[in-house]
Image (tube, rainbow, N blue to C red):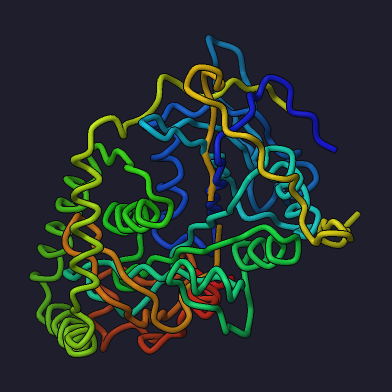
Amino acid sequence: MIELEGVPELIDPVMVAAFEGWNDAGDAASTAVAHLDREWKGEVFAALDAEDYYDFQVNRPTVFLDNGVRKITWPTTRLSVVRVGGDKPRDLVLVRGIEPSMRWRSFCNELLAFAHELGVEMVVILGALLGDTPHTRPVPVSGVTSDPDLARTMDLEETRYEGPTGIVGILQEACTHAGVPAVSLWAAVPHYVSQPPNPKATLALLNRLEDLIGLRIPLGELPEDARAWQLGVDQLAAEDSEVAEYVQTLEEARDTAELPEASGEAIAREFERYLRRREPGTGPGPGPGLATEGGDTAFLRDPGSGRTRPPKREQPTPETGPETGPETTPETGPEAAPGTDVADGDVSEGPVEPTSGDPGGGSAGAASDAADGGPEGSGGESPDGAGEDAGEGGAGK
């Protein structure tokens, strides 16, 4: 079992993970986790051995100079911990890395071992796919799970995806088999403007994550970056009449499909977020948790209970609790029609069925490509349950 020296006992930890590559269109998901790590000053406490999971001809190491000394950074997956302060402090365990090239079952087992040792209560995996969605509308964000009970209690879609999948889908299923509650949040990125970064999609994922785990997330400059990004795409589209016409077609289809869904529930969800942001004492805590560095097998499982994590630990009181600590969350792309959230703080919308042409992280053409009658996959699939259906290219599970 993994020994985690120097990491304090965590408070209601949630693991939040994102992986660069196939499941990360526009780098929206990995940027969201990087934002959490930066805003809450996360401390890395572990890194997986790159030699075990990565093909260095696919994900090459990089060389850099540190005070004149040459050093190498190897592609890997790192775990950090942050504490969110307030009346009810909570810890997050942040997992950020690159989709592994090999030994996916062992990769997931290793992450589950950390989750077990840290007492993680839920895993949330973030993903992004390419879809037929206009950049002028709120970014659709789908929440899916393989757990029927979790789907009912948290108002999520139960995944029904069948087809090729990515590490997001594999990790979610590994959590399900291990008895760890897992959720995937998928943002749909316009396929005609797929180049990273996409701050609007990143913002939409963070808004949805905020609703899911009930925490106020500091957004920093993301709202302004999202507005600037949209204005920039507006200008590019206006320069080509065919692109502008194509975007208008997407807008009309989106508005027609969502008109019946613009319900009071969506407005209530946005109002709750507004109130949460007004509450005092919900910002980040005093600092991050302490940290130390640190053949394929079946998914980890306790034969007796079907779970991989110990019973819930007693929550420390403000007087006796650890000085610092982390938080956490899970994955699976959009499948049918999970709820959507505004990318830049507008009212989140009702369920919508995101589609994807080539949901991968790097397959869609730029805005100029859309002018040729629109991208080929304009009818694309929805992701795994939400993410997987996203098809080949981006957000499959």
The residue at the point 61 percent across, 49 percent down is: 121
Q: Position of residue 192 (x, y in %)?
A: 30, 73
172 to the left or right of 361: right
Which image quarter holds the C terminus?
bottom right
Which image quarter holds the N terminus?
top right
Question: In the rendered image, is residue 73 in sight?
Answer: yes
Q: Image height check: is 143 above or below 249?
A: above
Q: Image height check: is 328 above or below 5?
A: below
The residue at the point 55 percent across, 46 percent down is: 14
The residue at the point 61 percent across, 37 percent down is: 79
Q: Nearer the viewer, residue 302 or 191?
A: 302
Q: Position of residue 341 (x, y in %)?
A: 28, 64
Q: Nearer the viewer, residue 86 or 387?
A: 86
Q: Position of residue 100 (x, y in %)?
A: 68, 54
58 to the left or right of 342: right
Q: Position of residue 28 (x, y in %)?
A: 39, 55
